[in-house]
């Protein structure tokens, strides 16, 4: 039971990092990215290639430590986001969504077919543990520390002038542009920063499972469920993004137990599709009953100049 709880908390924490990355893009700046799986997969493969031992089956053999793999994963995910953003960030939300779907599929097909780079459908095995023969509990501790750091940076950015500009762009882009702000630059910054966080989540996932293949980054697991987490928890709220990740992954895990024990044997093969259907129904209920999520966005309160301060200068 304790091992299952550690496994559940570990995967929930990885999805919470992913949800925080999406929150920077959609919750702060209103950038509709449906290609989360692309940056998630690039982060996982980048870290795996850098940290695994020498191999003749794919590019790699650098045998670098985990921290190097995580930095490379964030850098490559951010570089790809920068190149994509130069072309797509000016698009309207609906066109941007279509463009990111296409980019995600291109990345997945490249990972599947370019065997010299990624070992193709056979995937990459033997991805080392960050703690060098550590236990699942030590990996969970590492994840909690990473999640706390990402949460702190994301929350500080939200309250900083940078975050206020992003919210202004999300609410009224023409007015923000009229105020003299470089809207395209700020949107590109949010797109790159959010993608780097997704790349970091991919690196954490690769080192946790120890084996990755293109099938692990199907859109329903790497994109759809992350959107449900953010919408359920509360878009634009860092605490809501984390709460949504834990809540939805708990429901997802619960449906696995339910379908394996309740469904008749003839329906077991359809259990995965049924679970996705249940999550889709849940999303519709959330959108109808609580469209702002479990923890709605709460912008920082402006400073009241007439409010007396608690501190005084003593003469």
Image (tube, rainbow, N blue to C red):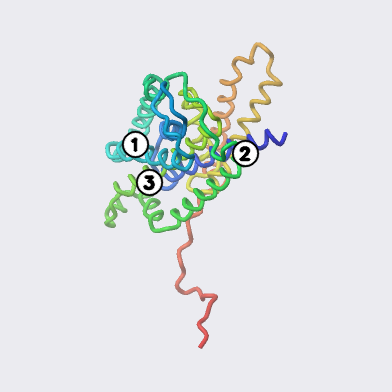
Label 3, residues with CA under 10 Å away: few <14, some 14-19, many ≥20 = many
Q: Are marks 2 and 3 in contact (CB under 8 Å)?
A: no
- Residue at 65% across / 11% down in the picture? 266
Instruction: Provide the residue designation for mark 3.
Output: 190
Q: Are marks 3 and 1 in contact (CB under 8 Å)?
A: no
- Identify the mark at residue 80; answer none if there is no mark: 1
Percent position (x, y) of residue 283?
Answer: 54, 33
Q: Is residue 42 left or right of residue 183?
A: right
Label 2, residues with CA under 10 Å away: few <14, some 14-19, many ≥20 = some
Q: CA distance from mark 1 to mark 2?
A: 30 Å
Percent position (x, y) of residue 206?
Answer: 50, 32
Closer to the chain start, of discs 1 and 2, is 2
Pick whichever, 107 or 134, lies toward us.
134
Closer to the chain start, of discs 2 and 3, is 2
Disc 2 element: helix
- Identify the mark at residue 248; answer none if there is no mark: none
The label nearer to you, 2 versus 3, is: 2
């Amino acid at each position: 039971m304790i091992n299952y709880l550690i496994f559940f908390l570990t995967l929930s924490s990885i999805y919470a990092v992913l949800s925080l990355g999406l929150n920077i893009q959609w919750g702060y700046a209103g950038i509709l990215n449906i290609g989360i799986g692309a940056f998630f997969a690039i982060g996982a493969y980048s870290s795996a290639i850098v940290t695994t031992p020498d191999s003749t089956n794919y590019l790699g053999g650098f045998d670098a430590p985990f921290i190097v793999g995580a930095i490379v994963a964030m850098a490559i995910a951010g570089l790809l986001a920068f190149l994509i953003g130069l072309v797509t960030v000016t698009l309207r939300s609906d066109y941007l969504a279509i463009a990111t779907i296409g980019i995600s599929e291109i990345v997945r097909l490249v990972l599947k077919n370019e065997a010299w780079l990624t070992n193709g459908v056979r995937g990459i095995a033997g991805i080392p543990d960050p703690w060098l023969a550590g236990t699942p509990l030590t990996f969970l501790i590492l994840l909690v520390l990473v999640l706390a750091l990402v949460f702190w940076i994301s929350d500080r950015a939200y309250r900083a002038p940078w975050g206020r500009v992003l919210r202004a762009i999300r609410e009224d882009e023409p007015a923000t542009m009229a105020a003299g702000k470089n809207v395209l630059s700020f949107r590109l910054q949010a797109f790159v920063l959010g993608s780097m966080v997704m790349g970091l989540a991919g690196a954490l996932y690769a080192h946790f499972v120890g084996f990755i293949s293109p099938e692990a980054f199907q859109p329903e697991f790497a994109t759809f469920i992350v959107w449900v987490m953010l919408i359920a928890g509360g878009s634009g709220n860092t605490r809501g993004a984390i709460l949504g990740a834990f809540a939805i992954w708990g429901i997802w895990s619960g449906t696995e137990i339910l379908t394996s024990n309740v469904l008749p044997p003839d329906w077991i093969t359809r259990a995965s599709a049924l679970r996705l259907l249940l999550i889709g129904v849940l999303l519709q209920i959330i959108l109808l009953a609580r469209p702002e999520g479990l923890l709605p966005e709460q912008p920082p309160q402006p400073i009241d100049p007439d409010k007396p301060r608690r501190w005084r200068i003593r003469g």
